[in-house]
Amino acid sequence: MVVEQLEPRGIVDPRVLEAMEWVPRHEFVPPELAGLAYEDRALAIGPEQTISQPYTVAFMCQEARLAAGDKALEIGTGSGYGAAVLALLAREVHTIERVESLYREARDRMRRLGYRNVHCYLDDGTAGLAREAPFDAIICTAGAEQMPRAYFEQLAVGGRLIIPVGPPSQQQMYRVTRQGEHFERESLGSFGFVPLLGNIERG
Ligand code: SAH
């Protein structure tokens, strides 16, 4: 997976490559799909929900420019795979999921696999997680129609928000970097995500 799918497509951060090599992706998919876990594709993990393609997870982590001491927030826990990769790149990971069955499974999986620096929450992630803010990185793994204002407010100075924005399955990925009270936006290319649901107050 790392040599065939990630390195040739521009994943070069050695920490990200190492984390992708380390996390057992087959543990995060339904047993009947374990044989496909390392294929270059997203997989269904439940009603209209997916575990992101390995490349997409690696890309978002690389673009988030994580340092080992960082505190990170993920919106859309899903299977917990992305949170597990983040757990190896950051000091502390907080991850929010709105579907209860996915939240429970991911929380139990994190415990079983020993990812002690991952904290799972069942909630609408469009409001972020004010009580744990500020975050050095916020990674939104569902496509937002608009950028939620809470994510801007909860970003540390120097912090990075990685978020796909646009209609379902045709989003543009953005990196928003906080420089004091100024937010710099960069477009990082096209991706297809399931929609971010909930009450979005625009940022
Ligand atoms: N990071 C996941 C990918 C999940 S796909 C993984 O590695 O497996 C996106 C997830 O976002 C879905 O599980 C979906 O239920 C969740 N989601 C959508 N809107 C949400 C919201 N408002 N708050 C929290 N989670 C949300």
Image: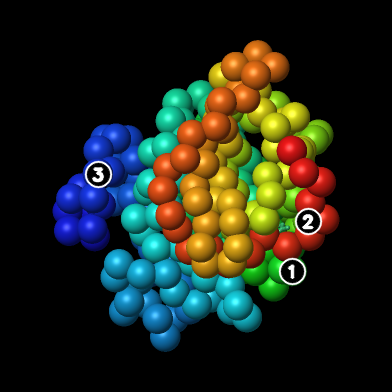
Which residue carries the number 2 mark? Answer: 124
Pointer 2 residue Cβ closer than 8 Å to ligand 1: yes
- N-terminal of the pair, mark 1 or mark 3, is 3
- N-terminal of the pair, mark 1 or mark 2, is 1
- Secondary element at image label 3: loop
Q: Position of residue 160 (x, y in %)?
A: 55, 30
Query: Does residue 192 appear left or right of residue 143 in this picture?
Result: left
| Closer to us: 187 or 121 | 187
Q: In which quarter of the image is residue 31?
A: bottom left
Query: Does residue 103 appear left or right of residue 193 in this picture?
Result: right
Q: Distance between the residues labelled 1 and 3?
A: 35 Å
- Secondary element at image label 2: loop
Which residue carries the number 3 mark? Answer: 10
Tell me the quadrant of the picture where the N terminus can be found. bottom left
Looking at the image, do the residues carrying marks 1 and 2 touch, with CB atoms under 8 Å apart? no
Q: How far apart are marks 3 and 2 (CA)?
A: 33 Å
Which residue carries the number 1 mark? Answer: 100
Which residue is rendered at x = 65% and y = 69% of the image? Answer: 102
* Crowd around label 1: few <14 · some 14–19 · many ≥20 (10 Å): few
